[in-house]
Image (cartoon, coloured by chain):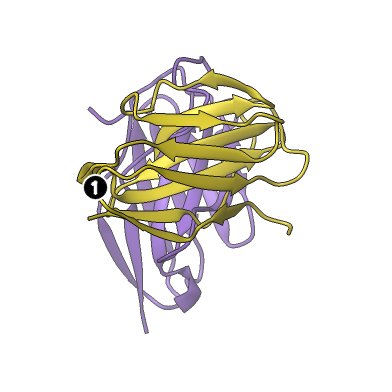
Amino acid sequence: GAGVSQSPRYKVAKRGQDVALRCDPISGHVSLFWYQQALGQGPEFLTYFQNEAQLDKSGLPSDRFFAERPEGSVSTLKIQRTQQEDSAVYLCASSPGSMNTEAFFGQGTRLTVV
Amino acid sequence: GESVGLHLPTLSVQEGDNSIINCAYSNSASDYFIWYKQESGKGPQFIIDIRSNMDKRQGQRVTVLLNKTVKHLSLQIAATQPGDSAVYFCAENSGSGGGADGLTFGKGTHLIIQP
């Protein structure tokens, strides 16, 4: 497809369960970002990849959160031992350049931890 | 506090009127700003951007104004239409690393278009 694709669109997890969220960026885009958006709030930065290199993970809230982009294309955000406060929409964005260029967002994955 | 914020959580305007959404930022090192539109259940959609070496940029029915002196950003939408109803976020990127490789978003303004 032409845009950023995320799957699944919705995920319900039991507390303590591990989850994996997938992001297919726009083909050829160098940069990939993950954001967390709580209800009624703006997106908050989690982590940033330039190709396969994770250049910034300062926004990851705890060591239960892990992201990878092994081949510089598809990325996976993994959350271990999910907790209720992890419930949010997780957005992925990609951009063609390395910095300060327009970022295109996917529709997000809505995670609900019960 | 918030690096980027918005003055009003909700803005209601009549269809056909012009609307102005405001944003204040505190990081004087920020050099790139974007306005995003987010409809319910969707990801943010790029509207318009502006770099710090400019003070105005125009798109189709939208204009972004940047006042670096008072660290203020605004989005003007001309002749609003029902499809403009959404939450609007301003975002900044200072590009200095340490979390700034991504964007910092404000809380958003919900624009409501009255028929």
Q: Position of residue B3 (x, y in %)?
A: 32, 28
Q: Is residue B112 left or right of residue B91?
A: left
How many numbered badges does the structure rendering display?
1
Residue highlighted by disc 1: A15
The amino acid type found where label 1 is placed reads Arg
Residue drawn 66% across the image and 29% down it:
A70
Give the quadrant of residue B111.
bottom left
A4 vs A66: above or below: below
List the single residue furthest toward the right.
A28
Q: In which quarter of the image is residue A110?
A: bottom left
The residue positioned 45% from the left and 29% from the top of the image is A66
For chain A, give the colour: yellow
Residue drawn at x 65%, y 40% as measured from the top left: A74
Compare residues B84 and A35 and report the one nearer the observer: A35
Q: Position of residue A31 (x, y in %)?
A: 65, 32
What x and y, as percent, mark residue A9? 48, 61
Residue B113 visible here: yes
Question: Residue at the spot x=31%, y=26% of the render?
Answer: A62
Q: Position of residue A38 (x, y in %)?
A: 30, 48
- From the viewer's perspective, is residue B35 above or below residue B20? above
Secondary element under disc 1, as helix, strand or loop, is loop
